[in-house]
Amino acid sequence: MKTFEKYLVAIFAVLALITLASCKFGTYEWPTEAPFRAHTPKVEPAFGTNPQTGENVAGLRVWWDALPNVRGYEIDRRCAAGLETRNFAVVSYPDTVFFDARAPRGTAFSYRVRAFNGADTGVSSEWTALRFAFPAVITGLTATAVSPLHINRDEVSRIDLLWEPVEATQFYVYRSTTNNPNTLTTAQNRIATISGAARRDYQDIGLSPNTTYFYWVKAVMNDTLVSEFSNMASARTLLAPPRNVQVEIIANDDVRITWDEGINGGAVGYEVFFETSRLQPTHSWLIADGSLSGRTVIDTGFVDISVGATIIYAVRAIAEDGTKGDFATGEAIKR
């Protein structure tokens, strides 16, 4: 074989060995004609581990399609106000998932990804759409019982709820007669879905008197992101007012006042007041204090009632814990 041919064969042999080594050991080179562009990542609310505390926390999960011949990915983050943080996080090959444990509840963020290989960096992906982490957990929930309302002569108890404002588009209100949030269900305990980002209150009407109710509220974002339960708040509805208050002027201008127990009972005593005005009662002339357990009282304080005079009385029930119900009134005219 001629010397030139020997040299040519040797060159081809070396090239073949280099090619074989590249395939076997995975020697990569970054493309020189055009850096790779990362695919636009996807984002969803999720729970994950906070790397600093080890706790399971709510945040945003970011993931993307893998690119060949890379050593890792750089992640930029942008908030709703437009402030960008370049290289917010770095993920090493072969991972293609990043959990943002620093995405506060109720805050929206956008992300983009860039691949790198050694000193070379690829082209950034497009920014994702802004995504919210889970809404913030509602705090400061309070429940307050108010006097029963008289609506079409029906006796209706009411509890007013109030909570601290959070970023949300809806709110789920839950109610139970037991203090156990682990047993709450959507079908049985969710009593209201309230729309409106500015809402921070709810009136629960149509409750049983003299009954304790427990409440929780969840914040909702865009019908899909739901916070955890708020703190628990409870209140006991006031006693229903007495029914069928009867006022009768009897001998010696004494006045007999009788009444029936309010719906669902629960009263351990009653207060009875003489009123000088039906439209502006003062509840200042007490003729029977809360120790009165019966449902009849006779007012002997009159000396002479003028013919045609209207006599008005107001009666309210008192519960065992000292709470007082709404008033019911009755009247009589001297004939």
Image (spheres, rainbow, N blue to C red):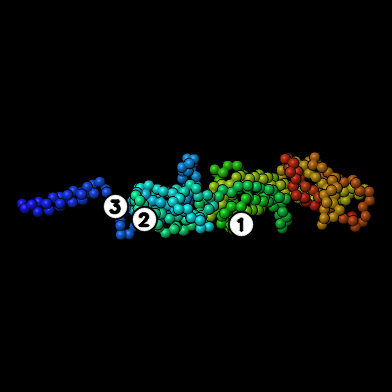
Amino acid type at mark 3: Glu
Which of label 3 and label 1 is nearer to you?
A: 3
Instruction: Identify the disc placed on residue 198.
Output: 1
**Crowdedness near tag 1: few (<14), some (14–19) or many (≥20) residues, C-alpha within 10 Å:** few
Q: Nearer the viewer, residue 261 or 193?
A: 193
Q: Which residue does the numbered mark 3 point to in the structure image?
A: 29
Q: Nearer the viewer, residue 27 or 304?
A: 27
Q: Where residue 21 sits in the image (x, y, percent)? A: 22, 47
Q: Where residue 38 sits in the image (x, y, percent)? A: 37, 56
Q: Element type at marker 1?
A: loop
Q: Nearer the viewer, residue 276 or 223?
A: 223
- Of the numbered discs 3 and 1, the one sitting upstream in the chain is 3
6 displayed left or right of 57: left
Residue located 40% across and 57% down the image: 124
Residue located 74% across and 43% down the image: 323
| Residue 186 can be seen, yes or no | no
Q: Nearer the viewer, residue 107 or 316?
A: 107
Q: Where residue 267 sits in the image (x, y, percent)? A: 74, 43
Image quarter (top left, top right, bottom left or bottom right) of the C terminus? bottom right
Residue located 56% across and 57% down the image: 169
Amino acid type at mark 2: Gly
Q: Which residue does the numbered mark 2 point to in the structure image?
A: 122
Number of numbered callouts drawn = 3
Amino acid type at mark 1: Ala
| Residue 121 can be seen, yes or no | yes
Q: Element type at marker 3?
A: loop
- Of the numbered discs 2 and 1, the one sitting upstream in the chain is 2
Q: What is the residue that sits farthest to the front in this orientation?
A: 3
**Label 3 to label 1, Cα distance in Å?**
55 Å
**Label 2 to label 1, Cα distance in Å?**
44 Å
Residue located 35% across and 51% down the image: 119
320, above or below 194, in the image: above
